[in-house]
Amino acid sequence: MEQDFQNQVGPEVVELIVADRLAEAAALYQTADPDPDETRAFFGSLDSATAAAFVSAITDESKAREVLLWLPPEQVGPMIGELDPPVAAALIGQLPSDERADVLASLDDDARTAIQSQLPAEARADAAALLQYPPDTAGGLMETELLKFPTTTTVREAIRDLRSNQERYAQIGVQYIYLIGDNRRLAGVAPLRDLMLAPEDAPLATLIRREPATLRDTDDLHEVANAFDEHTFIALPVVDSNGVLLGVVNRADASESEQHQTEDQYRVSQGIVGGEELRSMPVALRLRRRTAWLGINLLLCLGGAAVIALHQETLAKAIVVAAVLPVVSATSGNAAMQAAAVSIRELTLGIIEPRTWRRVLAHELSLAVLMAIPLGLGVAALARLWGADWTIGAAVGGAMAINALVAIAIGAICPLVLRRFEVDPALASGPIATTMADVSGFALTLTLVAWAS
Amino acid sequence: MEQDFQNQVGPEVVELIVADRLAEAAALYQTADPDPDETRAFFGSLDSATAAAFVSAITDESKAREVLLWLPPEQVGPMIGELDPPVAAALIGQLPSDERADVLASLDDDARTAIQSQLPAEARADAAALLQYPPDTAGGLMETELLKFPTTTTVREAIRDLRSNQERYAQIGVQYIYLIGDNRRLAGVAPLRDLMLAPEDAPLATLIRREPATLRDTDDLHEVANAFDEHTFIALPVVDSNGVLLGVVNRADASESEQHQTEDQYRVSQGIVGGEELRSMPVALRLRRRTAWLGINLLLCLGGAAVIALHQETLAKAIVVAAVLPVVSATSGNAAMQAAAVSIRELTLGIIEPRTWRRVLAHELSLAVLMAIPLGLGVAALARLWGADWTIGAAVGGAMAINALVAIAIGAICPLVLRRFEVDPALASGPIATTMADVSGFALTLTLVAWAS
């Protein structure tokens, strides 16, 4: 156990946990009051079952709530799943509605149903409402805690309500009041400070300055982000198709969700595909996910390998080419990945679309020609250095240059094609583009060498 | 020109720009009132010089400000750099202090100095203060617009100030008031709603409930994120070493900055290394950055290629092995990347550290053994299929299995070593781990094949 807290009781807490003296361990932990970093490091060193037993032994509700909020969601889910449903329900009952729904969504159906049925009525209803939305939509991002009044309420009445519920509203961080008109429809939004500056007898309707900016519950993350770019508000209300107020999305939550999406893209591009992996997860799950991905890539690279297997005779005549093949493969693959990364980025920003592929290709090929020439010359020189004659050198150099063009074009276009067919470009572009670059690279090199020799 | 706005005047705007009738183009653009997505797509299709001329022709200040806020920073910098300093200063003078500093930071020294000198005095001082901090620190993230009062001000006086500056404060989105005590030190923070609920004659000092949560100007992004995890406030004040209030960091800005960091990691892992690339950038810059990265990787993959070049005789005796080599290389490289991605993620979360490498290795190797066996068997079967005899098959299968272990171990440990020496793991782990996996994979395969044949 290497992690520790500022006041150095970390090892002692662990000893108590190992000795199964959980109450004492939890008491000592609460005294140590670790910050978010220390919390993540500490829980990262426990397996899910131990972590679950330990967190349920924490008596201070606000401390247990902090732990759940600070740990990454992929650690909280399995931990909650280990607990008895009433204990689990009591723990996640502490969380804001959106975080609670996220934890519930990460559980399997049985565990979720069991825990949901143990929640208090209001939290149960909120969870049911939020769980019907995919996580990356306005409905999935919203929280249901908000402050709303009928438009006919007076400023004085609203301030009186604020005063008497001060503590609760401070906890849910109220910034805006939402004004409800006929048929539960959202009529307007006003920042709290406007309430302070308005005449006390005025009805809240007088605070409405303009049509409120809203999100639809079905808006996807990109639309949510676009709306937050367009409006400077720190939160936007979510309405259904009838304009009924359902909840509110905070700018920070939307931004955090975008960050998770980027993290997923990154993770997936590195071959962690089935979902987030932490080393505290069960080995069987990690093994299954990692080998599934490696297996697919193994199959894909057979394409290139088969090309070589078919050209064994050519290779036998110029064995030095065997040393050049991995260079052609790696360099073409890297060049394809660069082009794909730029396309993925521009797709994300909305600068390009599948139907603008001609412009993408034109932009990319002018650059690709300039890149292909030095790469071809470099590889030709390399082959000479390893003892190939001039004609073989020219053949492999030419193959490298042509294949760089091919690879860059494939890399640039592949994400657009994938997006067109609604496959995640971050997931599939890398393997597809590098496989195609390998196949064409090996075929080009060995064909040109066969002609030359 | 494929982009268009909802009311379909896009092509017309472009025609006017091409005809150099910029005033008319800008007028039409303002009528169209494109949203952030449309704005990015539209400007993404213009080169920097044209974009600069066009944006400076927009007469509605708030529209021009929106354009600058909505475009990605890597597009705004070059655009501003194209403008005459007075025009550029007038444009970025519209931006919040933190965004203005970001744009200035992206310019070269001459352009920055020229534009800064044209800013109004207050903005110039703010920019100078913010530019002294690296962008990913609390000082670099903060904005200087905030609402502060001496602790001796009464609630009535503060409300009067709020009332008379209502418009300006609404624009900067005031949520908290900051209370200043002796020596300009930050004495406390209060949410605006507390002001509303307090007796009018009370001095603001009575609103202070606890020691304020603060950031130090030198805190890095990780510390800032940790503080926002720890506290639920939507903004945190930034102080210097004397406790003097310097500015305020918004939760959403911190979160957005984390997102950019993740995007950078992703980008860099895909070989876009010198900085963000968009196809609207000059070809020379894109060429230089992309080939620099490809060149380094070309040099790195020479390691593996040299191993093959040294074993030409072995290969000539069992030419089928040439087809297996890229499979060993790609599979080992992918396995190394997976392990590296998990280490990078756990480093980011703070779960592991360079000194916990033993635990990382132990966790990883138990998984690696289980992955190596099926990979070895698969590659052995493949070699048989392509005509190798049993001994060669066993040799390449064994090499694959051993190299999978080696590659996974290298991948898992490499990010820790890089972090230890303060090199960005996201940047260097991929190339280093795959190169080492190639060298050991080729050497293992060809050595075992030499023994077997």
Image: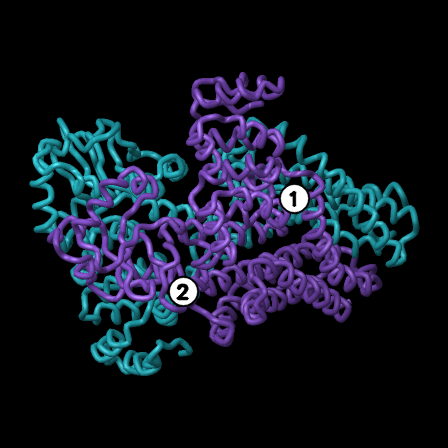
Chain colours: A purple, B cyan
Q: Foreground mark, 2 or 1?
A: 2
Q: Where is residue B84 in the image (x, y as percent from the top left)?
A: 20, 63
Which residue occupies the foreground of this view, B12 or A56? A56
Which residue occupies the foreground of this view, B82 or A157? A157
Spot the residue most to the right: B390
- Quadrant for the N terminus of chain A, please: top right
User: Left of B304 or right of it: where is A315?
Assistant: right
SS at circle 2: loop
> Amino acid under label 2?
Asp
Marks 2/1: CA–CA distance? 47 Å
SS at circle 1: helix
Picture quadrant where residue B339 is located = top right
User: Left of A233 or right of it: where is A92?
Assistant: right
- Residue drawn at x 41%, y 46% as measured from the top left: B258
Q: Where is residue B381 in the image (x, y as percent from the top left)?
A: 86, 52
Q: Do callouts 2 and 1 point to residues on the same chain?
A: no
Numbered circle sitting on residue A240: 2
Note whether residue B291 is visible. no
User: Left of A163 or right of it: where is A143?
Assistant: right
Q: How crowded is mark 2: few (under 14 residues within 10 Å), some or many (20 or more)?
A: some
- Residue drawn at x 36%, y 57% as measured from the top left: B74
- Quadrant for the C terminus of chain A, please: bottom right
Instruction: Provide the chain ID for the residue under circle 1.
Output: B
Q: Where is residue B87 in the image (x, y as percent from the top left)?
A: 18, 63
Picture quadrant where residue A149 is located = bottom left
On screen, A30 above or below B62? above
Numbered circle sitting on residue B336: 1
Q: Position of residue B135 (x, y in %)?
A: 33, 44
